[in-house]
């Protein structure tokens, strides 16, 4: 008699040899841990089933292309991986992809039970059950009290728009570019005016490693406030002159998520449970990427909370166009500030 496990293995054997079962992108700082934790699970799956899953987990950091960069543009769901792990508001939030695959119900969330209450209350669970956010990439503030002077300590994100911080803020980015996620949040809450006010206060965009080093030193190129990923804020050298501020209205968040084919949920259950499970979640939390798994202690600062763009906002907008628009408004204001 065929057991449930036999049935699972039978289904996976029907996949073609060239089929990509898992495409997994992880945050740069977490990639080695992610792969080290996942590889044994993939190996065990292979031993138990006699089937080697076809997976691709790139390990490089920085901006680079790989052979799966265009996978979002697949014309058939059969040409799309069974599981995709990704992050940010990128290609898998494009309107074309959402209309072609997501809204047609091809993907189903891994969260059928509870998630971390803090994230539940903030609305991170997809009400349609399509996306599975399993962790987040938070942005906080790092304040150099020496350069802050007699200005009040910033407490919430709207403080970043106040004229007292003119040219007093450095933001995550590089080579004149600014991280997209913070701009989306400022635009959602403060509109074009907010982006223009923010641009007046942003002096430069730096890699977060550079920000962490400058804030903990007497670097004359540094400034009062840094909008920085939590990982890098925690990675700085200890200094009584530097204060980490977790904004009272919540850390800005970029999602770390899964897209799981409904047809593959049972077949690839061990892989899904590995990525969303408490063990991986604890490792993720330790690396400053808080987990949505309810059994994980994210070891957050007291009263820490998270901002979320909101599923209604995400699904009612073309995020690719919105990112381009917010970047254009901000960049124009940033480039032309101080000009008559």
Image (spheres, rainbow, N blue to C red):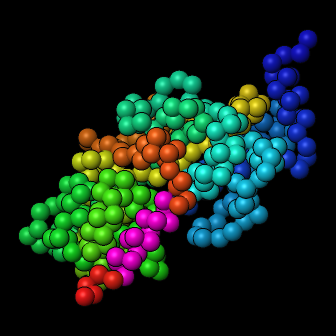
Percent position (x, y) of residue 142?
Answer: 28, 63
Which stretch is magenta? 322-335
Residue 82 placement: quadrant: top right
Residue 320 placement: quadrant: bottom right
Q: Nearer the viewer, residue 65 or 94?
A: 94
Observer able to see residue 167? yes
Q: Residue at x 37, y 82 (%)?
A: 335
Q: Nearer the viewer, residue 283 or 262?
A: 262
Percent position (x, y) of residue 337?
Answer: 29, 81
Q: Residue at x 78, y 36 (%)?
A: 45
Observer able to see residue 289? no
Tell me, yes or no, whether the highlighted magenta stretch contains residue 249: no
Residue 297 placement: quadrant: top left
Percent position (x, y) of residue 290?
Answer: 44, 45
Q: Residue at x 76, y 31 (%)?
A: 263
Tell me, yes or no, whether the highlighted magenta stretch contains residue 324: yes
**What is the chief secondary structure element of the magenta stretch?**
helix
The quadrant the C terminus occupies is: bottom left
Image label count: 0
Q: Residue at x 47, y 41 (%)?
A: 311
Q: From this view, report whether residue 143 is shown above or below residue 257.
A: below
Q: From this view, report whether residue 231 is shown above or below residue 313.
A: below
Percent position (x, y) of residue 7?
Answer: 85, 22
Q: From this view, report whether residue 285 is shown above or below residue 245.
A: above
| Horizontal side of residue 145 vs 322, given as left or right | left
The quadrant the N terminus occupies is: top right
């Amino acid at each position: 008699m065929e057991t449930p496990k036999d049935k699972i293995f039978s289904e996976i054997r029907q996949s073609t040899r060239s089929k990509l079962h898992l495409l997994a992108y992880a945050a740069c700082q977490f990639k080695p841990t992610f792969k080290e934790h996942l590889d044994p699970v993939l190996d065990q799956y292979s031993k138990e089933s006699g089937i080697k899953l076809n997976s691709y987990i790139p390990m490089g950091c920085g901006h680079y292309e790989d052979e799966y960069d265009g996978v979002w543009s697949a014309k058939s769901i059969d040409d799309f991986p069974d599981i995709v792990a990704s992050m940010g508001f990128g290609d898998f939030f494009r309107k074309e992809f959402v209309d072609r695959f997501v809204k047609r119900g091809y993907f189903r969330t891994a969260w059928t039970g509870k998630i971390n209450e803090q994230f539940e209350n903030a609305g991170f669970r997809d009400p349609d059950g399509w996306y599975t956010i399993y962790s987040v990439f938070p942005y906080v503030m790092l304040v150099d009290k020496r350069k802050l002077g007699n200005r009040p300590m910033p407490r919430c994100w709207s403080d970043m728009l106040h004229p007292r911080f003119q040219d007093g803020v450095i933001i995550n980015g590089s080579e004149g570019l600014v991280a997209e996620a913070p701009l989306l949040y400022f635009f959602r809450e403060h509109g074009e005016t907010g982006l223009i006010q923010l641009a007046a206060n942003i002096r430069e965009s730096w890699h977060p490693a550079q920000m962490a080093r400058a804030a903990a030193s007497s670097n004359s190129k540094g400034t009062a406030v840094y909008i920085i990923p939590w990982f890098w804020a925690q990675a700085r050298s200890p200094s009584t002159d530097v204060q980490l501020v977790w904004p009272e209205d919540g850390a800005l968040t970029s999602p770390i998520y899964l897209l799981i084919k409904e047809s593959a949920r049972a077949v690839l259950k061990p892989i899904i449970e590995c990525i969303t499970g408490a063990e991986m979640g604890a490792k993720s939390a330790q690396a400053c990427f808080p987990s949505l798994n309810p059994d994980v202690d994210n070891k957050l600062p007291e009263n820490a909370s998270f901002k979320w763009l909101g599923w209604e906002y995400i699904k009612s907008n073309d995020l690719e166009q919105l990112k381009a628009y917010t970047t254009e408004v901000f960049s124009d204001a940033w480039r032309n500030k101080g000009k008559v």
